[in-house]
Amino acid sequence: MSNVTFFFNHKLTGADFKARKAWFERKPSSTTSEPERAPEIEVPFDFLIGADGAHSAARFHLMKYARVSYQQEYIDTLWSEFHIPPNFVSATAPSTFALSPNHLHIWPGTRFMFIAIPSLDQSFTCTLFAPQSTFDTLSRDPSAQLAPFFAANFPGVCPQLISPTNLVAQFGSSPHLPLISIKCAPHHFSSAAVILGDAAHAMVPFYGQGMNAGLEDVRVLFSLLDRHGVYDPSVPARSAPPSLSRRHDDRDDRDARRAEALAAYTHQRATDAAAINDLALRNYNEMRAGVVSPVYLLRKFVEETVSVWMPWAGWRTQYSR
């Protein structure tokens, strides 16, 4: 796009959302002779969109200007990635999937779980989710403990799909990372700034909607900007004194309309984001423990039966809503 410029290696270090100025540390492109501190540049802006992830600098500086209610939670679960290679038949025959590629495979373990998701190259990307205490125990002696742990809790994985040696190697080479859940409101300040995606609502991955929620943020934001006429040059100015220039009138009017659009955006998205965040946390309990509970399975059977065979009752399952 000819009207878009990308600047890499720029770190947001400060922002004044009233004066509409931001400051960035600019990391030199060459690493041979870096100074003690990267040079800082000042950038004036009209409208700042912060989409810089769960540990958002834009959100940090936004909280100095807006009265942001903020909630952050690290759940007692770490995750580590594994890999199931394709089945190699022969040099002349094509490789095949080691498991059905049409399903999400889950090995529930009540307090932990192992999942496998098919990839385009006929391998599976897998993830172990477990409490930190479990990772600590396994990390003390992976060669002796990892294979028996998988055999006891995730039957059919090792050695059938991943060899013990490969399992230990993958456990040692993959980082063991935390899972964070973030809620905040509002998502904006006046007409100057708004945060999107994980910067506004980081969520655990168990509902599979984190990226979708971020993309929906963009769709909703720009539909509201359009609905409020922020980019419509035909709408007359409303808020500036008539003595000011037409250009100043348009700018002030655009700011007023953008402030209304951002307020509407926060009103809609903060509630929706909190809901999908809660659903993601709840779904972890269902995936690792609920699916092996007779009570849970009976409840799901009743729910689906009523939804399919008695639609006049108005009941719909959670996934069909």
Image: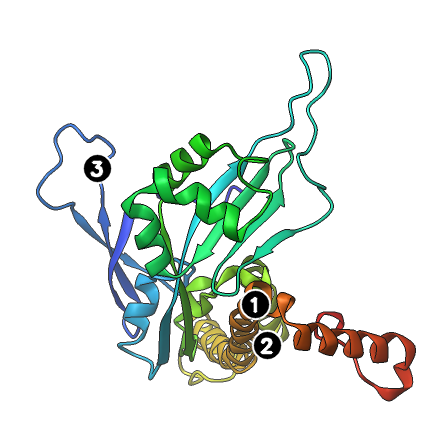
Looking at the rendered structure, the kind of residue marked 3 is Pro
C-alpha gap between disc 2 and disc 3: 41 Å
Local SS, label 1? loop
Looking at the rendered structure, the kind of residue marked 2 is His
Relative image position of residue 281 (x, y in whole percent): 51, 71
- The circle drawn on residue 28 is 3
Looking at the rendered structure, the kind of residue marked 1 is Ala
**Left of 214 or right of it: where is 48?**
left
Mark 3 crowdedness (10 Å alpha carbons): few <14, some 14-19, many ≥20: some
**Left of 310 or right of it: where is 9?**
left
Identify which residue, 154 or 76, lies in the foreground.
154
For the residues carrying marks 1 and 3, which lies nearer the camera in this image? Answer: 1
Per the image, the residue denoted by label 1 is 289
Mark 2 crowdedness (10 Å alpha carbons): few <14, some 14-19, many ≥20: some
Q: Are marks 1 and 3 in contact (CB under 8 Å)?
A: no
- The circle drawn on residue 15 is none
Mark 1 or mark 2: whose residue is earlier in sequence? 2
Per the image, the residue denoted by label 2 is 228
Mark 1 crowdedness (10 Å alpha carbons): few <14, some 14-19, many ≥20: some
Task: Examine the image and state in which quarter residue 57 appears.
Answer: bottom left
Relative image position of residue 69 (x, y in whole percent): 36, 82
Q: Is residue 218 visible?
A: no
